[in-house]
Image (cartoon, helix red, strand yellow):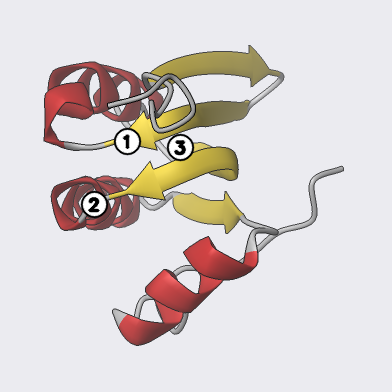
Amino acid sequence: MSSSDHRPDGSVCSVTIGTRTTVALHGEIDLAMAPQLIEHLDAATAGHRPDVVVDLRAVTFIDCSSLGLLCRARRRSQERHGHLSLICTDARTLRLLRLADLLRIFPLTDPT
């Protein structure tokens, strides 16, 4: 594999401002990233009435296991009477969400 074929590793970081937690995903989000993704999403959805935004703008690849973890986080937030939304502007990622029929359950929010 040449260096031009190399995909960057993924990363996850969280920032809480006021009552809203933003979980930002970067690079390749796949099965290898699951433990890190679970840690951040579980922390973000742990409290009463969690307000969580998952920022997918810097994602270059996301697999079905990671989409499943987003669904799990959505369920956790709803069980706690909270809200989880996505920021997504990439056409490929939006297409994947649409094909997986996830755009009907995940509200999209502006990146403001």
Query: Callout 1 environment at 10 Å: few (<14), some (14 to 19), or many (20+)?
Result: many
- Quarter that holds the N terminus: top left
**Looking at the picture, which amino acid does disc 1 mark?**
Ile
**Disc nearer the start of the sequence (1/3):** 1
**Residue 33: horizontal and vertical position, in percent?**
22, 24
- The residue under label 1 is 29
**Looking at the picture, which amino acid does disc 2 mark?**
Asp
Q: Is residue 74 left or right of residue 38?
A: right
Q: Secondary structure at mark 3?
A: loop
Report how far apart the C-alphas of labels 1 and 3 lie in the structure.
23 Å
Report how far apart the C-alphas of labels 3 and 2 lie in the structure.
25 Å
Q: Is residue 30 above or below residue 85?
A: above
Q: Are marks 1 and 2 in contact (CB under 8 Å)?
A: yes
State the residue at coordinates (40%, 29%).
7
**Disc nearer the start of the sequence (1/2):** 1
Depth check, mark 3 against mark 2: the one in front is 2
Is residue 67 visible in the rendered image? The answer is yes
**Residue 2: horizontal and vertical position, in percent?**
37, 24
**Residue 46: horizontal and vertical position, in percent?**
29, 26
Q: Secondary structure at mark 1?
A: strand
Q: Is residue 63 left or right of residue 108?
A: left
Is residue 107 visible in the rendered image? The answer is no
Determine the residue located farthest toward the front in the rendered image.
Answer: 2
- The residue under label 2 is 63
Quadrant of residue 80 in the image?
top left
**Residue 34: horizontal and vertical position, in percent?**
16, 28
- The residue under label 3 is 50
Q: Secondary structure at mark 2?
A: loop
Query: Callout 3 environment at 10 Å: few (<14), some (14 to 19), or many (20+)?
Result: many
